[in-house]
Amino acid sequence: MTNFFQYLFEVSIIFAILYVIYSLFLSGLTFHQSNRWTLLLLLPVSLGLPFLDLYTLLSLPDTELLNTTIKTPLFHLDKISEVSEINNTAIDLTNNYGYSLWIILLVYCIGTCLFSTRLLISIFKIYQLKKNSQKINIDGILVFASTISNPFSYFNWIFIPKTQIENISTLIVKHEATHVKLRHSIDLLITELFVIMFWFNPLVYFYRKSLKSIHEFQADQGVLDTTIKTSDYLKLILDSIQKTYQEHSYSYFNNPIIKKRIKMITKAKSKKLLTAKYLLVVLGAALLSVAFAKPQLNSVSPENLNTKVLPIAEPPSIFPIKEWSQDNITSTFQQKIRQPITGEILIHQGIDIRALKGTPIIATADGIIVKADAEGDWGNLIVISHADGYQTRYAHLDGFNVIKDQSVKKGEVIGYVGNTGLSKGSHLHYEILKENKRLNPLGFIKE
């Protein structure tokens, strides 16, 4: 869940920066088609940049990375003459942490549901309008006369007020026909889906207005490219100022951007040299791809840990759970056990600590998070690289409080006890390694 919120945050930041660049440097240009595509491309770029691993694309392949190292089983098979079984089960009580995250998720889901419902209702109303409309032909263009106040278009349908059938200007119909021809409704639908996902970001609403303004400019230009005089068209626009009602999300002939439309119609064409400004968006996206890239640490394998600059040269020295007792340790290092799920006889390579689901887990030394993700039998796994080639692993977690590449201090909460992966009860599996060799964690506990 933390990763999901992190993704939403990163997309919002990237989108905000790119949209501000557009607003400051490009919105005033008369290159309407270029502006339209620039705005539309902001969405996939914003959604995709957090996934771009630029460092992997630019770096040389490594001979051994963490992902190959951690595939080592939790236990090590050995020739066993006797077995001492340890009951590794625990009562999975109610999770009592992370309520704030669940509240945020609930609020976010409510918002997405409300905006999704709003969009579906709007689409339903459009279909109802079409169903109850009267088909007529104006200057060779099929339109639907309905009980609305202002003309608008939706995909291939053009709607006009029934009260204006006799005196509606053909220029208005051509204006809406241009919207249909340029498929502006697709842009609006894509934008609405983005708004549903990022409704909490106020800039998405300004973005939607900017895109609709571009649509207006293109439709105006489509009319002006005919034999109509600019002065006659401007008079038609000014006449529409008296009409204040706006059909939800789809009406183009409306008041809020009339001043912008008049200014754009009367504005001199931008010089082609100014197209160089679009490179600012490309440059912004490139810089953001570096800022939000998730670097692959070449030093994440035990062999390379010594080359990683780590905060303090101190080995792991505390217990991974704050409040503990010897009774909570259900499996010790090098103990012969029978795996409770597979039934295999194994040599345990760490210690198992019984704890309630949701119990905070702490870093046992300063270090850098090299993994915080699901990993097969390990379940949710955190791996921390420390100074002097030490590495600690925390398995079967219920959730994370850190992300990859984050620096952590000794005693900082990094995650929460869970029952994920190859586990049969709420507990923490904890390991300490040095130079890829497993060590007894109990020999390091000094506090």
Image (spheres, rainbow, N blue to C red):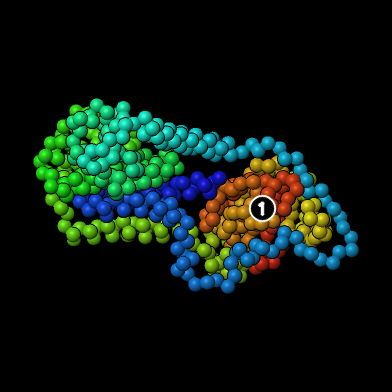
161 up-or-down from 218: above or below: above
79 sits left or right of 50 in the view: right
Residue at (78, 52) in percent of width and height: 341
Disc 1 crowd rating (10 Å Cα; few below 14, some 14-19, many 20+) is many
Q: Nearer the viewer, residue 413 or 376?
A: 376
Residue at which label 1 appears: 379
The x and y percentages for residue 17 are 34, 50
Q: Quadrant of residue 251?
A: top left
Residue at (44, 35) in percent of width and height: 120
The x and y percentages for residue 255 are 23, 33
67 up-or-down from 416: above or below: below
350 sits left or right of 311 in the view: right
Residue 168 in sight from this viewpoint: yes
Label 1's element?
loop
440 sits left or right of 15 in the view: right
Q: Nearer the viewer, residue 116 or 56?
A: 116
Residue 260 in sight from this viewpoint: no
Q: Nearer the viewer, residue 386 or 203?
A: 203
The x and y percentages for residue 194 are 41, 44
The x and y percentages for residue 146 are 31, 30
Mark count:
1
